[in-house]
Image: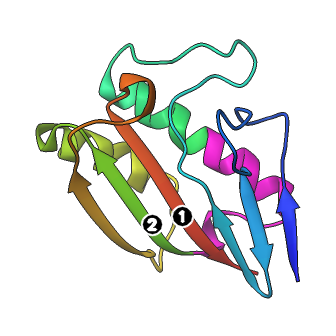
Amino acid sequence: MKTIINTTNAPAPIGPYSQAVAAGNFVFLSGQIALNPTTGQLVTDDIKTETKQVMENIKAILIEAGIDFGNIVKASIFLTDMQNFAQVNDVYGTYFQDAFPARETVQVAGLPKGVNVEITVTAFK
């Protein structure tokens, strides 16, 4: 059985997908970009601000699922420019205390709406 997770505190899906799906003890979040859920505008002032908005969107979905960053077991970070890795990593790291999740970071040719970073996570309840 699966449960669809949606919150108005994160951007509404821009396609045929859910913000997250809980299946068994796992919660699978769709990739998040830097859309401000209140204004619907992209937050792309600089890579750190963009990454913070992405992480805040993830946080809102995790809260809706009744969990937090400590429950994340796997993260995938997609960047359009690997030169941004260190700055993205700096922001990303502030959301975790210890026992960091497994992760990969890859450079891609493009991301939705022309953003610079997209992050998706899998968490355990």
Residue 82 is left or right of residue 95, and the answer is left
Q: Quadrant of the C terminus?
A: bottom right
Q: Is residue 92 above or below residue 87?
A: below
Q: How far separated are the C-alphas under marks 2 and 1?
A: 4 Å
Image coordinates of residue 10 in percent, x first then y, are 73, 36
Span highlighted in magenta in the image: 57-72
Q: Based on the picture, tell me whether residue 55 belongs to the magenta stretch.
A: no
Q: Is residue 106 left or right of residue 11?
A: left
Main structural element of the magenta stretch: helix, strand or loop? helix
> Is there a contact, CB below 8 Å, between mark 2 and mark 1?
yes
Q: Position of residue 17 (x, y in %)?
A: 69, 50
Residue 55 figure quarter: top right
Of the numbered discs 2 and 1, the one sitting upstream in the chain is 2
Name the kind of residue labelled 2 in the image.
Answer: Ala
Q: Name the secondary structure under disc 2.
A: strand
Residue at 65 percent of width and 68 percent of height: 28
Residue most extreme to the bottom: 24
Mark 1, secondary structure of its residue: strand
| Pointer 2 residue | 75
For disc 1, the marked residue is 121
Instruction: Indicate whether 22 appears above or below 9.
Output: below
User: Which of the 4 image quarters holds residue 115?
Assistant: top left
What amino acid type should be assigned to the residue bearing mark 1?
A: Val
Residue 65 falls inside the magenta stretch: yes
Residue 97: give x, y in percent of width and height.
51, 66
**Residue at left offset 31%, top offset 43%:** 88
